[in-house]
Amino acid sequence: MYNHSTVFTGADLIKRFFNWLKALFNKTMDNLEDPDIMLDQARRDMQQALIGNREKAVQAITQKNRLQGMLDEANRKSAQLESQATTALRQGNRELAKQFLREKANNDQTIETLKTTLAQAVETVETVKVAIKRQEEDVRRKTAEALAMKAQWKQAQIQTSISKALEGLTFENEYEGSFAAARDRIKDKQAEASARTEMMAGSVQGKMMAMEDQAMDFAADEELKKLEEKLGLAAPNIQATTPAATQSVDEQLEALEKRLGQGNGQG
């Protein structure tokens, strides 16, 4: 008979066995849901589908070519029967010529049927060719997309591994202050470098804007001076009166009076 300890050990072994089966099942499911495996399987499925469609397209083209050969053969036969009928008429055998022409008429009906069937086959083959070409482009696009997704998956795995590795790291309190100080100093240095870059860009831009403003102000002053002169609003230039200046004004006034006197005399 089994004692209590033996029964407990057996139950424990059964529990461990089921836990192992559960872990094995979960591992298998994780492998099946692994993006690398899923993408590779999808790529293989697309390629297999493309290969199968290409084979079907080859068979369709083969049948189309067979129809074309049958039509060519039927056309040659009709031409031959017509030639034979012509030869029979030349030999005076009207009945034989008539028989050849009857056979040609039946063959011509076959030709019309072959033409219709061949036209449909050609249209189908061209449609299949276009579909195959689109499928090839889609496979190339999906393959490139799969490669990019696999690279992203690898990056995510690396990041997860790094995160898991960092979770197990521990630091003594005596190092925490140095670590924080170094981090703050790096941030300050980065901020200072960013500020210097910003100030340098602002300084250069400010100088350029100041030069542009000076040029615009100078041009505006010139335009304003011209407008004031045109409207007679220009401020008089106050200067000390000199005899030479007074004499010049008197001479101008005298010349004006003379012109006015001459004008009245002529009137």
Image (tube, rainbow, N blue to C red):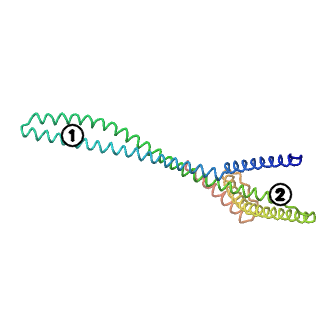
**Residue 65, above or below 212:** above
Distance CA(mark 1)–CA(mark 2) = 88 Å
Q: Residues within 10 Å of mark 2 (few under 14, many from 20)?
A: few
Residue 162 image position (x, y, % from top left)? 77, 59
Check disc 2 and report the residue beneath it: 167
Q: Residues within 10 Å of mark 1 (few under 14, many from 20)?
A: many
Number of residue marks: 2
Residue furthest left as drawn = 92
**Residue 212, above or below 9:** below
Of labels 1 and 2, earlier in sequence is 1
Task: Indicate the quadrant where residue 210 lies.
Answer: bottom right
Q: Who's the residue at 63% across and 49% down the image?
A: 38
Task: Look at label 2 and name its amino acid.
Answer: Glu
- Relative horizontal placement of residue 186, taking residue 21 as reference (left or right): right
**Residue 100, above or below 231:** above
Check disc 1 and report the residue beneath it: 78
Residue 253 image position (x, y, % from top left)? 67, 57
